[in-house]
């Protein structure tokens, strides 16, 4: 172990719940060949906070070629999933579970969006390229030692979210880190200090160079995460929301709606006023079509006087149940659209053709008239009732 690694050890972490037979065999294999295998990234942060991580990232001081040598020598199957970036996927010897393992890296060139990397043996140099101090920690799988080069543990315990080193330098490596800072500071309810706010204001305009997909990925997590109102308020104050095209209007309603849903599109809709704003955001953030359609549906209906009956009528008229379900949560109605069995409209186009109608626009118009009559009856009119009504209607017009 290097001196830098000895100095970085802060404590031991209990890994009993995490170490599977497959992981244990991988650790033994790397150690046998003189290399370390560690957990890095968000999983370390979760473990330090006493939480079970959902995803675990692995890193090593072995190069991809050296990893291949280890795997082949120990009979471990592997896949070259991202070898150019230093990542190989090892298949667990017992279960064939995939484990992505990445070689330590340093950034050689950055343009504010992407970085060219080269491999390194230094765990500290790899940690330097991380965004936040508590995301730069690592845990040695061999002994459970927590390595913390930039006082991330101290920051977590003191309620601070800090960039690694100079805030401006970290942002300029990847300007999306501005949004990541908001997401994590909100998650842990950490205030953003004045110097970091100043750096954000100075760099916010560079977010225009970040792809819309990456912006929406972060914004959706901010909206659905804890303390989203705090994050959005600070994003507004620092000019970030304006730069990414996010209106900030009604944080009180956002908090209210968050008690009923975590759907980021529904939460986003609390801040939007019309379809034009939805389309502007779709163009900037590259929303998927279903996301855009849900946002338009919510924004166009949230100001209407709604009740459960009107929500049911929307479903009968063809609205998607999941859309209506989110609308009910948005406006605060207790209607579970997914549990409501919509009645079947008893008249079909073939029924009207049998009654003498020709296929075409007039048939569709007449079918819709009958459907609205059926809805007005609270779905009680039968096919006979509706066709009788049609006959009376035709007699009046003849």
Image (cartoon, rainbow, N blue to C red):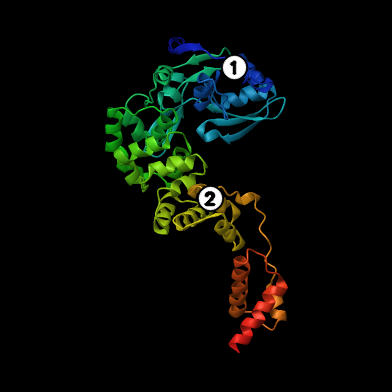
Foreground: 202 or 331?
Answer: 331
* Quarter of the rendering containing residue 314: bottom right
Residue 72 rendering spot, x and y as whole percentages: 66, 25
Above or below, comparing residue 341 to residue 189 in the picture: below
Outermost residue on the bottom side: it is: 398
* Disc 2: which residue: 328
| Rendering coords of residue 16 (x, y %) | 62, 16
Residue 15 — which label? Answer: 1
Instruction: Say whether marks 2 and 1 touch (CB < 8 Å).
Output: no
Which circle marks residue 137 in the picture?
none
Q: Residue at x 61, y 66 (%)?
A: 375
Residue 296 lies, with reference to residue 54, above or below; the image says: below
Disc 2 packing (10 Å; few <14; some 14–19; many ≥20) = many
Give coordinates of residue 373: x percent, y percent: 61, 71
Left or right of 81 in this view: 187: left
First-in-chain label (2 vs 1): 1
In the figure, 140 relative to 294: above or below?
A: above
| Label 1 element class | loop
The front one of 121 and 38 is 38
The answer to whether residue 220 is visible is no
Quadrant containing the C terminus in the rendered view:
bottom right
Query: Which marked residue is nearer to the observer: mark 2 or mark 1?
Result: 2
Q: What element does badge 2 sit on?
A: helix
């Amino acid at each position: 172990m290097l001196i830098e690694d000895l100095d970085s050890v802060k404590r031991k972490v209990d890994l009993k719940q995490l170490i599977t037979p497959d992981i244990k065999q991988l650790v033994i294999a790397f150690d046998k060949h003189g290399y370390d295998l560690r957990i890095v990234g968000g999983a370390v942060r979760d473990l330090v906070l006493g939480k079970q991580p959902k995803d675990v990232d692995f890193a090593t001081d072995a190069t991809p070629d050296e990893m291949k040598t280890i795997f082949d020598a120990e009979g471990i199957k592997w896949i070259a999933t991202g070898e150019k970036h230093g990542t190989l996927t090892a298949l667990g010897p017992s279960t064939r579970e995939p484990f992505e393992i990445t070689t330590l890296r340093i950034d050689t060139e950055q343009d504010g969006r992407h970085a060219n990397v080269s491999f390194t043996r230094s765990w500290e140099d790899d940690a330097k390229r991380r965004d936040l101090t508590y995301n730069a920690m690592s845990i040695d799988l061999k002994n459970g030692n927590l390595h913390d080069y930039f006082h991330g543990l101290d920051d977590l315990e003191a309620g601070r979210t800090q960039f690694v080193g100079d805030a401006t330098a970290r942002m300029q490596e990847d300007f999306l880190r501005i949004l990541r800072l908001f997401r994590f500071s909100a998650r842990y309810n950490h205030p953003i200090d004045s110097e970091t706010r100043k750096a954000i204001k100075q760099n916010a305009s560079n977010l225009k160079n970040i792809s819309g997909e990456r912006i929406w990925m972060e914004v959706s997590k901010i909206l659905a995460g804890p303390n989203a109102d705090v994050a959005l308020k600070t994003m507004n104050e620092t000019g970030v929301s304006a730069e990414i095209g996010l209106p900030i209007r009604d944080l009180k309603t956002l908090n209210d709606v968050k008690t009923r849903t975590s759907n980021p599109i529904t939460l986003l809709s609390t801040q939007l006023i019309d379809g034009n704003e939805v389309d502007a955001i779709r163009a900037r953030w590259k929303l998927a079509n279903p996301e855009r359609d849900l946002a338009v549906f919510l924004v166009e209906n949230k100001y209407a006087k709604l009740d459960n009956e009107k929500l049911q009528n929307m479903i009968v008229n063809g609205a998607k149940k999941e859309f209506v379900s989110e609308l009910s949560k948005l406006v605060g109605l207790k209607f579970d659209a997914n549990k409501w069995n919509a009645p079947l409209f008893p008249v079909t186009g073939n029924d009207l053709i049998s009654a003498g109608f020709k296929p075409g626009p007039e048939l569709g118009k007449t079918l819709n008239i009958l459907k609205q009559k059926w809805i007005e009856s609270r779905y009680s009119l039968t096919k006979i009732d509706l066709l009788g009504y049609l006959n009376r209607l035709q007699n009046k017009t003849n």
